[in-house]
Image: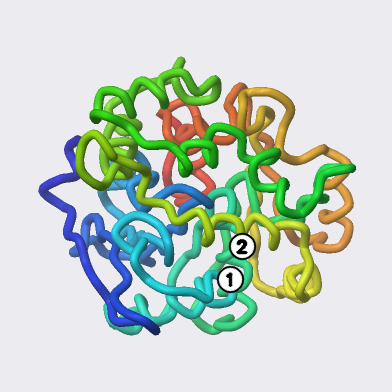
Amino acid sequence: MSTRAGYAPFTVPVAGGDLAGGVWHPDAEGMPILAVHGITASHRAWLLTADRLPHRRLIAPDLRGRGRSSGLPGPFGLVQHADDLARVLDALSLDRVVVAGHSMGAFVAVRFAERHPDRVERLVLIDGGLPLPPPEGVAPEDVPAVVLGPAIERLRMRFASPEEYEAFWRRHPAIGPWWNPAIADYVAYDLVGDAPELRSSADAEAVSVNALELDGSAGYAEALASLLLPIDLVRAPRGLLDGPSLYDPAVVAEWHERLPGMRIHEADDVNHYTILMTDAGLRQVLPVLDPKETPR
């Protein structure tokens, strides 16, 4: 991708070790974007976004327990992730940023805004951030598998080769049909270990901890409702398996009543992944991330 010349990896000291990530376009002017990935993802989920915003500095960490931060110990909760983000901004000498979060990353963004409101210009929540009611009749320990499907199934799997891992992702109903170089990069970065025992870098314990936090418990719903800064929510019409949306319109409407200043953007003809990892999705997200950006 064309961003490689304008990309630099980083590590930042945090509790328990070093948090990894990357910065795209480090010399770009204007308000930087702090981009927070989803529950089993990594900072490479933002590659295409960075490629399409060459005039904006984009900082994206690998959250604790994911990517090259997978070796960090717990706690893995949303609050810990939020405080890790503050350490990233400190290390990069950044006082204030636009904070964008996709999926679980949107929940982290909300916790960050709650704990560090003076550092947030505005929030952009991409198909995430609103509490998700747990599936009815599902035991707590089964919630991650039911909600995330193949994304969490792979954490228990081992792969003989990079090609086998790519084939697994190509079969994913919400990703395979839209395969592109950015998705291939994301998948390749996630693979760690040695053949024939290759595996995802995401830590299953960290993922399970965060999956149980998405229902708005532990004061999360109250934190979201208390935010006074500008918030944009971009909702995908299809979900994690390219089926029903992650968010029923009634849930969005309920939260819009509680946060009347939140701007709702209904994306068209994308799912939970393609809203961020394809040009069809980014044409609808970029004007929200950067209001000067016009759809291409």
Mark 2 or mark 1: which is in front? 2
Place of residue 189 in the rendered image (x, y in percent of width and height, measured from the top left): 27, 44
* Left or right of residue 181, residue 280 in this image: right
Above or below, 263 against 227 in this view is: above
Place of residue 26 in the rendered image (x, y in percent of width and height, measured from the top left): 21, 63
* Left or right of residue 137, residue 14 in this image: left
Crowding near the residue tagged with mark 1, few <14, some 14–19, many ≥20 C-alpha atoms within 10 Å: some
- Is residue 284 in view? no
- Residue at x 51% of width, y 41% of height: 285
Crowding near the residue tagged with mark 2, few <14, some 14–19, many ≥20 C-alpha atoms within 10 Å: some
- Residue at x 33% of width, y 29% of height: 165
Q: Which mark is residue 263?
A: none
* Left or right of residue 274, residue 70 in this image: left
- Residue at x 52% of width, y 61% of height: 206
For badge 2, the amino acid type reads Val
Proximity of marks 2 and 1: CB atoms separated by less than 8 Å: yes
Mark 1 or mark 2, which is nearer the start of the sequence? 1
Tag 1 residue: 77
* Left or right of residue 194, residue 58 in this image: right
For badge 1, the amino acid type reads Gly
Pick whichever, 68 or 53, lies toward us.
Answer: 68
Task: Name the secondary structure under disc 1.
Answer: loop
**What's the distance in space between the residues labelled 2 and 1, CA to CA?**
7 Å
Place of residue 296 in the rendered image (x, y in percent of width and height, measured from the top left): 40, 28
Q: How is the image coloured?
A: rainbow
- Residue at x 52% of width, y 38% of height: 151
- Is residue 40 in view? yes
Place of residue 112 in the rendered image (x, y in percent of width and height, measured from the top left): 56, 74
Tag 2 residue: 209
Task: Name the secondary structure under disc 2.
Answer: helix
